[in-house]
């Protein structure tokens, strides 16, 4: 059953999309069906869908899932498409039949094979590429209940990205309401959230920190708090839990390549170590000697990932983890390790330590080339407004020394006004060699302190 048929069967009598103009589920279904009838020549074609606004994007995926053989969701960056793929909205006029041979009934009850959905990877682990999914695998984690149907979701991710599509499908398939909050800075977005009475948000930890920095997050009547895309650290989980004690708080592990992994709902960082021996939510786990996390999902991954599968069907996520008591905690991406004189430093681990300091609101840790040690650790930090930066430098160094080894210590702290995030809402790490701006202040330690 495709997406349009699922919504037709559910018969939700509520608002589906809210904004300057609100649309009900019945209106979206009728508009999507009309789009199918208007372009019968697109049946069994491969379509590339670009995002211009939430209303038209939702109509397009409703119309073309189960109608076209493949849907390519174009990201907000350029990525090559197969030559046979047709762009939608079209750059050239697509011929339509003068007298459509497609009836309303057959357009609604298309019997063609389920569409393949293609999503682009972010490129953080290499060149961006297309990964195929099925509609069944994409909606595997959707939750339904009378309470869930009352949620008003803020779409904070680009809907062509895996995380954004998950929010969109969760909203549509549960009968909830969705508002596009994927544009503007944190102040503009939270103002829109207040206007739309948003009570459910899914975002990266980096974006949650930006929302907290506005000082207005507590004005939202949040019932659902979801974190994903980056490591959810304990201080952030504790802060959100204290501000919204009655909200459901969870952090999700998922990726474009692996699909939906798992959700942790106990408000603790990492996940229970018991999941390594007892499958959780039909996902099987294991760790290798290099501390890589491997997952086995009931849905086979895209064929392009076969090189990362072992003989048992487990996929190497290329995320580094370690057992810590009764938990398995995330260290970071294997490809993001900083090599300091032969010692491996995980940027995310240093960031989590820095974020424990009450003056640090956000941080990004990255490598700086060193002629002596190969690489050194550098940290950009956003701090509270009443902070004395000179005093803070020494405080941070002492704070880090209590929890980190000498080679893990940042050699420089750059105090910045803000940190950039990419289209996925994650910290931008590709520009780590960009020199500090005029508004940045830094303090450097001697390189020989690492020797």
Image (cartoon, rainbow, N blue to C red):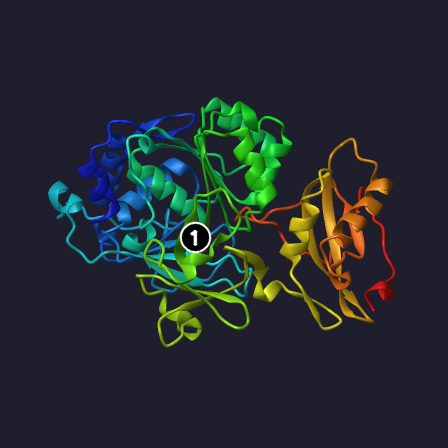
Q: Residue 120: image x %, image y %?
A: 45, 57
Mark 1 is surrounded, within 10 Å at the Cα level, by few (under 14), some (14 to 19) or many (20 or more) other residues, namely many
Vertical comparison of 139 with 411: above or below = above
Residue 212 relative to residue 192: left or right: right
Question: In the image, what residue occupies the spot 37% across and 77% down?
Answer: 311
The residue under the point 78% across, 31% down is 386
In the image, taking residue 68 as reference, residue 183 lies left or right, namely: right
**Most distant residue in the bottom direction:** 311
Write the residue at 26% across / 58% down: 69
Q: Is residue 441 visible?
A: no
Q: Position of residue 35 (x, y in %)?
A: 26, 42
Position of 20 with respect to 169 (left or right) is right
The quadrant in which the C terminus is found is bottom right
Name the one closer to the observer, 287 or 277: 277
Q: Nearer the viewer, residue 65 or 194?
A: 194
Asked if residue 101 is positioned above or below residue 330 in the image, the reply reads: above
Asked whether the viewer can see residue 134, the reply is: yes
* Disc 1: which residue: 74
- The spot of residue 180 in percent (x, y) is 45, 35
């Amino acid at each position: 059953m495709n997406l349009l048929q699922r919504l037709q069967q559910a018969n939700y009598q509520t608002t589906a999309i809210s904004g300057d103009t609100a649309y009900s589920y019945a209106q979206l279904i009728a508009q999507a069906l009309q789009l199918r009838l208007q372009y019968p020549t697109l049946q069994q074609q491969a379509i590339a869908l670009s995002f211009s606004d939430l209303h038209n994007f939702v109509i397009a995926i409703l119309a073309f899932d189960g109608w076209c053989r493949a849907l390519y969701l174009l990201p907000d960056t350029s990525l090559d498409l197969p030559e046979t793929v047709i762009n939608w909205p079209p750059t050239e006029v697509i011929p339509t039949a003068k007298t459509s041979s497609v009836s309303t009934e057959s357009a609604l009850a298309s019997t063609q094979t389920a569409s393949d959905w293609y999503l682009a990877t972010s490129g953080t682990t290499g060149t961006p590429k297309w990964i195929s999914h099925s509609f069944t695998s994409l909606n595997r984690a959707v939750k339904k209940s009378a309470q869930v149907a009352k949620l008003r979701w803020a779409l904070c991710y680009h809907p062509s990205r895996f995380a954004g599509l998950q929010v969109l499908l969760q909203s549509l398939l549960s009968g909830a309401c969705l508002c596009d909050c994927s544009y503007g800075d944190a102040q503009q977005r939270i103002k829109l959230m207040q206007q739309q009475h948003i009570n459910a948000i899914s975002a990266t930890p980096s974006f949650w920190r930006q929302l907290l920095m506005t000082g207005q997050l507590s004005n939202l009547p949040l019932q659902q708090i979801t974190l994903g895309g980056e490591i959810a650290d304990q201080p952030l989980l504790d802060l959100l839990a204290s501000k919204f004690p009655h909200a459901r708080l969870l952090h999700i592990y998922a990726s474009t390549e692996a699909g939906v992994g798992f959700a942790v709902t106990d408000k603790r960082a990492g996940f229970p170590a018991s999941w390594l021996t007892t499958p959780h939510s039909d996902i099987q786990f294991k760790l290798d000697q290099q501390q890589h996390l491997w997952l086995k999902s009931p849905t086979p991954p895209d064929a392009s990932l076969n090189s990362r599968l072992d003989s048992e069907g487990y996929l190497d996520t290329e995320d580094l983890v370690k057992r810590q008591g009764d938990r398995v905690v995330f260290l970071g991406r294997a490809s993001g390790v900083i090599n300091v004189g032969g010692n491996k430093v995980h940027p995310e681990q240093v960031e989590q330590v820095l974020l424990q300091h009450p003056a640090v609101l956000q941080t990004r840790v990255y490598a700086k080339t060193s002629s002596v040690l190969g690489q050194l650790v550098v940290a950009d930090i956003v701090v509270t407004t009443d902070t004395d930066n000179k005093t803070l430098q020494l405080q941070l160094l002492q704070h880090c020394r209590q929890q980190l080894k000498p080679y893990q210590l940042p050699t420089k702290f750059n105090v910045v006004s803000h940190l950039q995030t990419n289209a996925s809402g994650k910290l931008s790490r590709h520009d780590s060699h960009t020199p500090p701006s005029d508004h940045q202040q830094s303090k450097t330690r001697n390189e020989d302190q690492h020797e």
